[in-house]
Each structure stands twice: as C-alpha cells, then as structure tokens.
Image (cartoon, rainbow, N blue to C red):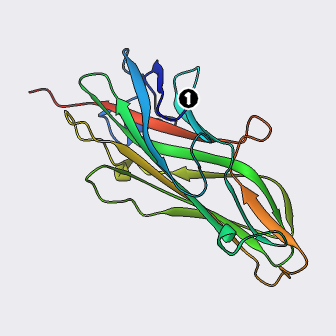
Amino acid sequence: MPGGLIAGAALAALFASPISTYDASIIVNPPPDKIVIEIATVNGSGCPAGTAAVAVAPDNTAFTVTYSDYLAQVGVGSKPTDFRKNCQLNLIVHVPQGFTYAIASADYRGYAKLEPGASGTEKASYYFQGSSVTTPISHTFRGNYADNWQATDRVDVAALVWAPCGEKRNFNINTELRVNAGTSDPSKTTSFMTMDSTDGDLNTIYHLAWKECPRN
C-alpha cells in the first residue's frame, strides 16, 4: 500500500538476447542482497490516495504497480476533465551496496472500450530525482476496440539511464492515459481506457537491469 515498505530480492534484467553482447558491465544474475522499495509519494488524477500499490515479483525479476482507479473516458457520463488521467509515482529504492540499476523494459496492461473513430493512448516516462526526464514512450489504440490491451516499452542497452552510484536518488515513474472521441459521437456513446486490477492481472510490470558500481 502507498507509504508502506515492500521488501524483495534484487531485480534482474530481462532481454531476449544476451545483454553482455552490448555492455559487458551489465550483470545477468541479480545481486544477492535484498532490496526495499518504498512509495514516497503518489500524485495524479489516475491514482487517488490508496489506489496504487507496489510489490516485488516472487521470481525477483521485476516489480509490479497495481492500480484500482485509473480510468480515462469521454462521452456519456463523463466529466470534461475525464479524457486525461495521469499518475506520478515517486519511489525510494534501497539497493545493495556496490550496485546500481536502470529500467530495462516496462509492460503495461489494462482494458479499453473505444467506439469507432475514437482512440486511446498510454504514455510513460522515467527519471531519477535531479536528472533529466526521459523522452516519453506512447502507445495508441484505435476503435472499434473492446478488449484487454498490452503495451511494452523497451530501452536499448546503450540508452539505459542508471541510478548514480553511491547516491540516494528517488525514482519517478510518470504515466498517462488519454482518450480522444475523434469522429465518434460523445453525446451518444462512451469510450474509455483503464490501467487497473479489475480482474487481478491488469497491472504494470517494470523490469530492471543491474550492474556493479566502480570500486574506489
């Protein structure tokens, strides 16, 4: 739950091909010590207080963010501001001494019901406190659509942004859902897009890469 501590073992990178091919300093096996992830703050219309939680995966390869009230919509029954919802998670990640980490990929899941002519977009960016915000990565789905959706952000090894070694920097995850009525008729229909946990497995999974810090 927000504000709580979630303990788990260190996270490993997940890549389809051996990452050592690209950067020999990146390790495949996670460091042996446990990590602790704490939610420092949660802000945004897509994640009201008490509706976002973080947990470390049992196989220690990722952490999962679960939402219970992340919904953007346009049309009948919608407020003017409902077309866009966002959430910023500020995480404190306590890592084993001598190691650093970076986001390698992220899997987003949810459900969308988009009328013909409407569209829905999921967008995300990641950055460490005091560092530049990464270029947002977005995925768009177009109506007619009524099904679960999934999108994956993959970061090239050369573009990985690492947490500064020996420094404590909070990690920020910014996400956004946006629904556009397009050519559909919002006076007669409703289009919406969610990122939530309605059926227990609609959530967001972040995979991390690890490497050892230089020794003094």
Q: Residues within 10 Å of mark 1 (few under 14, many from 20)?
A: some
Q: Residue at x 36, y 20 (%)?
A: 31
**Residue farthest to the right?**
188
Amino acid of disc 1: Ala
Q: Residue at x 23, y 41 (%)?
A: 164
Q: Residue at x 73, y 36 (%)?
A: 201
* Vertical relation: 116 (above or below) 9: below
**The residue tagged with tag 1: helix, strand or loop?**
strand
* Vertical relation: 24 (above or below) 141: above
Q: Position of residue 112 (x, y in %)?
A: 79, 58
Q: Position of residue 182 (x, y in %)?
A: 76, 82
Q: Is residue 199 shown to the viewer in this render?
A: yes
In which quadrant will I find the N terminus?
A: top right
99 with respect to 49 (left or right): left
Q: Position of residue 170 (x, y in %)?
A: 33, 42
Q: Position of residue 146 (x, y in %)?
A: 86, 59
153 with respect to 186 (left or right): left
Q: Is residue 15 shown to the viewer in this render?
A: no
Identify the residue under disc 1: 55
Q: Nearer the viewer, residue 132 or 191?
A: 191
Q: Nearer the viewer, residue 115 or 187?
A: 187
In which quadrant will I find the C terminus?
A: top left
**Residue farthest to the bottom?**
183
Q: Residue at x 78, y 75 (%)?
A: 118
* Vertical relation: 138 (above or below) 195: below
* Vertical relation: 57 (above or below) 48: above
Please identify the quarter of the rendering in which residue 205 is found: top right
